[in-house]
Image (spheres, rainbow, N blue to C red):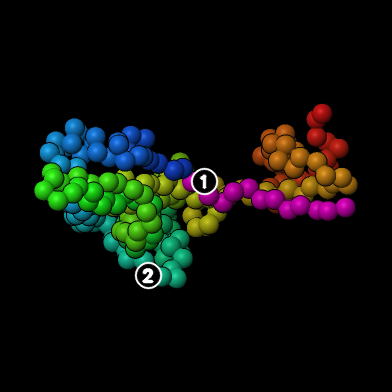
Amino acid sequence: MSVWMWSVLDRIYLTGYVPTLQVSGQVVNFLTHHLGFPIASPAVFEQIGTRFRAQVRGFAAECGVPVVRFVKGDRKIEVMRLLLARAAAAGRPGVVAVGTAQEFQRVFIGAKCSGEGEAPRFAFTRNDRRTTCYYFYLWDAEFGPAFVKICAYFPYPMKICLLTDTTGVGRAGQATVRSRLVIEHDEPRDLAALVVAQVGALVATDDPWEPLRLRFDDLPE
């Protein structure tokens, strides 16, 4: 008999992206038709990124929130824990701090492909490049702590993360709920199907710290 331990997620990630900026042809269309540049040049990427970084600094200054520079090895949530806790204690929703880090991201790069004497043309491909990423840490009275991560380089991928018990500053006045799932089985069956079939029982347990024990025999045929 094997025993599987399972805990509810301590965070939920949502990935954000611009669907019309995912292939090279869309990049060219964006630069020429949407922005109106006569040549689809990768130099525009840096111009947009520079403007965005200036706007982030302006936003932080206007709102009076600190800008925290993460360094290699930092556990970001630990760096931000005190600021989030202060916001939760004060019942003050909104952006708590802006974190910044240099990270590798999948972004577009451009290479000149025109020949001698031809009008400039560029080919765009995706590559991993170290670039600036911003983390907007916030606290919300309903959802608790969260952050929005935005890459400052084209095509500006982003993530939204809703945190639960990782900060110790969950929903105001409410205890953080965690559960464990112990699955006992004597023969190989579809573990994922069992979890999905019984997930409702997890949130219905009276004691969230008490393991919920299920057998594969409980799996509906």
How far across and how far down the image is residue 10, in percent?
56, 51
Residue 203 visible in the current orientation? yes
Between 164 and 55, the residue placed more toward the observer is 55
Residue 15 falls left or right of residue 113: right
Residue sitting farthest toward the front: 116
In this rendering, position of residue 162 left or right of residue 114: right
Give, as a single range, the part of the protein colored magenta.
1-13
Task: Please tell me the numbered disc located at residue 71.
Answer: 2
Identity of the amino acid at label 1? Answer: Ile
Characterize the magenta stretch by its predominant secondary structure.
strand
Between residues 91 and 203, which one lies in front from this camera angle?
A: 203
Whether residue 171 is visible, yes or no, is no
- Callout 1 crowding tier (Cα within 10 Å): few <14, some 14–19, many ≥20: few
Q: Residue at horizontal 33%, vertical 55%?
A: 134
Which dot marks residue 12? 1
**Against 67, is 90 above or below?**
above
Using the numbered discs, state the Cα–Cα distance from disc 1 to disc 2 in whole angstroms: 24 Å
Could you tell me which quadrant the C terminus lies in?
A: top right
Q: Is residue 4 magenta?
A: yes
